[in-house]
Image (cartoon, rainbow, N blue to C red):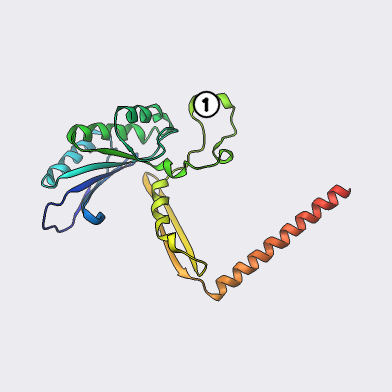
Amino acid sequence: MTTTRSPTTAPDPVVLVCDPGSSSLRLVLAGPGDRVVASRHIEQPPGSPAAAAAVDAFLSEVVSRPVRAVGYRLVHGGPALTRPSLVDDEVLREVRAVADLAPLHLPPTLDLLDNLRRRLPDVPHVVCPDTAFHRGLPVVAATLALPAPWRDKYHLRRFGFHGLSYAWALQPNKNVNATTIPTMTVTRRAGVPGTARLTERPADQADRSRARRAGRDQSRRAGHRRARHSSDRVC
């Protein structure tokens, strides 16, 4: 278990950010301007007694800072939670209803939610589903090749995962234009939330030449396919 702390001069209000995995939990206190005031990595399942004790110890250490809100990474929002949602009884029912879609993540997250709502009852608690990023998937992409009764009964569809990481990685890409080449690296380790890094560099002559060659090759392949189809119809 590791803790980091930034030097501070005044007890600014903070937001407690919780990133529960299946076997570990990361807590971050974010101050004004998203500045990290304090953080802790707990190498225990979020719903375990050891993790609950570590969370209590962390909050006791930073008790001088008023926590204004608590945010949670929710690995799966199911079909109902398609955007960040203020936690109430209805939201909890929706999460519990789809807990079997992510059995290693959602039950411990629910335990963490219950613990922190008891510990911080007067502040808003917000869940941010990873699956929300993919809510616009077209039907043809979201539908699994399974019998419709199974899909309807068990909420079986393609949801998409790690959306919070993807959304963050794409933010710097808003101003990319034809003169820049974006490159993205997404890394994933078992038990650790996906992270992504996006870098940009100016397009050089070699980049442009490769792009032109790729375009010509694609056009040539498409022409060959059309020729084969035409000969098939003749035969």
Q: Nearer the viewer, residue 23 or 85?
A: 85
Q: Which residue is more in the foreground, 46 or 76?
A: 76
* Horizontal and vertical percent position of residue 74: 35, 39
Q: Is residue 177 left or right of residue 70?
A: right
Describe residue 119's horizontal placement relative to residue 234 as left or right. left
Hey, which quadrant is residue 57 in on the image?
top left
Q: Position of residue 139 (x, y in %)?
A: 56, 38
Vertical placement of residue 9 versus 29, above or below = below
Q: Secondary structure at mark 1?
A: helix
> In x, y percent, where is residue 67?
18, 44
Q: Nearer the viewer, residue 122 or 155?
A: 122
Give the farthest residue toward the bottom: 205
Q: Amino acid at mark 1?
A: Asp
- Asked if residue 202 lies left or right of residue 27, the reply is right
**Pointer 1: what residue?**
152
In the figure, is residue 147 to the left or right of 202?
right
Q: Residue furthest right?
A: 235
Rate crowding at label 1 as few (under 14), some (14 to 19) or many (20 or more) other CA atoms within 10 Å.
Answer: few
- Residue 11 vs 131, above or below: the answer is below
Say whether residue 36 is visible.
Answer: no
Q: Position of residue 152 (x, y in %)?
A: 52, 26
Q: Is residue 213 visible?
A: yes
Q: In terms of image quadrants, where is residue 207?
A: bottom right
